[in-house]
Image (spheres, rainbow, N blue to C red):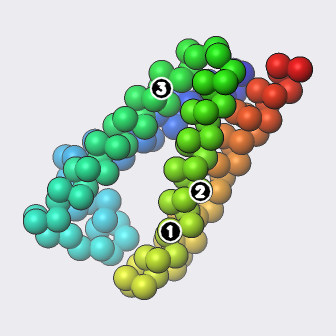
Amino acid sequence: MKALKILFVIHAAVTLAAAIALVVAPAWIPGMINMEISREQYLLSYFLGAAEFAIAFLSFQSRNITDQYALKNIVVTFIIFHAVTGLLLPFGAFDGINMGIIIGNIILRVVISVLFYFLGIRMVKTNTK
């Protein structure tokens, strides 16, 4: 459980950083993948930033949750978020996003999902038996 708590805190910190970046500098993260957005499109970054704030908050607060059922649902939600994001990334190739960036991001999403699976589902099952 300690490893899962650490993962929740790291996940919260990284997600919070992304949320802040999306709100403070809405074109910066899209610009990292050579995607230009105009001022009229900043609202999309703000909406994504709002979702990232909520995910960061949930991740940080989850470090104190002891209910196994609640933890499992939170972990599965994070796995779904990262797995679906990874599955949608190849669509970026149609928009001219560098394949190296897409593949790197997919690998990152797989690693995050696997960590949440092993630390949040598999380990929790093992500890409750």
Q: Position of residue 81 (x, y in %)?
A: 52, 50
Residue most toward the right? 129
Residue annotated with mark 2: 83
Tag 2–tag 1 contact (CB < 8 Å): no
Residue at 23% across, 73% down: 36
Q: In this view, does 31 lie above or below 117?
A: below
Q: Which amino acid does label 1 sit on?
A: Leu
* Label 3 or label 1, whichever comes before in sequence order: 3
Q: Closer to the camera, 90 or 24? A: 90
User: Image point 52% across, 76% down: which residue?
Assistant: 90
* Extreme residue toward the left, this view: 39
**Among numbered discs 2 and 3, the one appearing first in the sequence:** 3
Q: Tell me the number on the disc at residue 88.
A: 1
Query: Mark 3 Cα within 10 Å, few/some/many (few <14, many 20+)?
Result: many
Give the SS element for disc 3. helix
Residue at 10% in and 65% down: 40
Q: Is mark 1 on a helix, strand or loop?
A: helix
Q: Is mark 2 on a helix, strand or loop?
A: helix
Q: Do the residues labelled 2 and 3 touch (CB within 8 Å)?
A: no
- Considering the image in quadrants, where does the N terminus appear? top right
When asked about the image quadrant of residue 32, the answer is bottom left
Q: Which residue is drawn at 17% across and 56% down?
A: 43
Tell me the distance, in whole angstroms, between the alpha carbons under discs 3 and 1. Answer: 26 Å
Residue bearing the label numbered 3: 60
Mark 2 or 3: in front is: 2
Q: Can residue 99 be seen in this view?
A: yes
Q: In which quarter of the image is the C terminus?
A: top right
Figure check: 75 above or below 82: above
What is the C-alpha distance between the residues marked 2 and 1?
9 Å
- Amino acid at dot 3: Phe
Q: Which amino acid does label 2 sit on?
A: Ala
